[in-house]
Each structure stands twice: as structure tokens, then as C-alpha cells.
Amino acid sequence: MQVVTTPKVVAALERCVADFAESVRVRGEAAEALAPNHRRKSHDVLLKHLTDSSKDVWFWCAFALGQIAELRAVPALKGLVATDKRTVRGFHSVSKEAEDAIRNIEVENKSHRTRNGCVFCRAR
């Protein structure tokens, strides 16, 4: 999927992730596409769909949340690490992706605190 940057496209991707009438593959790709270009509401949409009915959507929401280093996702991601060993075709397990996301969140937030001297900054 190509990089998207306009607010209308980002909003459309958020709606797509949440649209249960859409195919699981498209919803997962929409979640993945939110990683490089997102807004604050995107974080909430991705967090909500970490408990979606589809492992593919969980996988790509975990990926995107790790890329955007969303601290609020860590508890839910830890739950996925402990419980979801299902594999997403062509990739690895949901638990492995959740583990990778947690690691990225921890690294990015530590780096942010070091750069900015800020322990609780959530300005992203």
C-alpha cells in the first residue's frame, strides 16, 4: 500500500480498520498503512482493534502501535504475547508481533525521554 498523508485518507483508513463488513485482509492493510501516517484518533482505533475478531487485524494493529510507540498498548500487547500463538499467513505469530511491538515501544519511549528529559511526555 502506498504512503498516505492527507487527513481524509487517514480518516478513511481508520474507518476501514473498524468496518467489519470489509475483508480482514483489507482491514489489516489499512491498520498497517496507519503506522507511518496517523493522527491521535488513529491510536485509539488501533488500540480498540487489538481485540478484534481477526488475528490478522490484531497482528497489523500490534505492528502499527509498535511503530508509533503507543505506550497505552503495552498491557494489551502483553496479553497477546501470553495467549496468541496463531500465525498470520506469510508472517509469524501474533504473539511474536506483539513482542516486537512492545520492544519498539520501550526503545522509542526511552529514547524520547532521554532526548527531551521528559518522563511522562505523550506529545506524539
Image (cartoon, grey):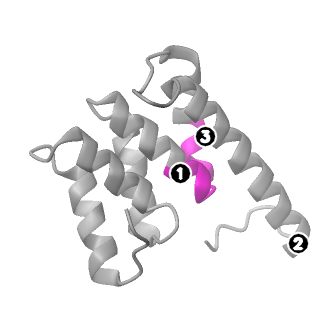
N-terminal of the two: label 3 or label 2?
A: 3
The answer to whether 54 appears left or right of 77 in the picture is left
N-terminal of the two: label 3 or label 1?
A: 1
Residue at x 29% of width, y 76% of height: 9
Looking at the image, the residue that sits furthest to the bottom is 6
Which dot, 3 or 1, sits closer to the camera?
1
Residue type indicated by callout 3: Val
Give the alpha-carbon distance from disc 3 to disc 1, as whole Å. Answer: 9 Å
The tag on residue 115 is 2
Q: Are marks 3 and 2 in contact (CB under 8 Å)?
A: no
Residue type indicated by callout 1: Leu
Up-down: is 55 above or below 124? above
**Residue placed under numbered mark 1 in the picture:** 65
Tell me residue 5's x, y (percent): 41, 80
Q: Main secondary structure of the magenta part?
A: helix
The answer to whether 63 appears left or right of 55 in the picture is right
Residue type indicated by callout 2: Arg
The tag on residue 74 is 3
Give the alpha-carbon distance from disc 1 to disc 2, as whole Å. Answer: 21 Å
Magenta-highlighted residues: 64-75
Query: Which of the 4 image quadrants contains residue 90?
Result: top left
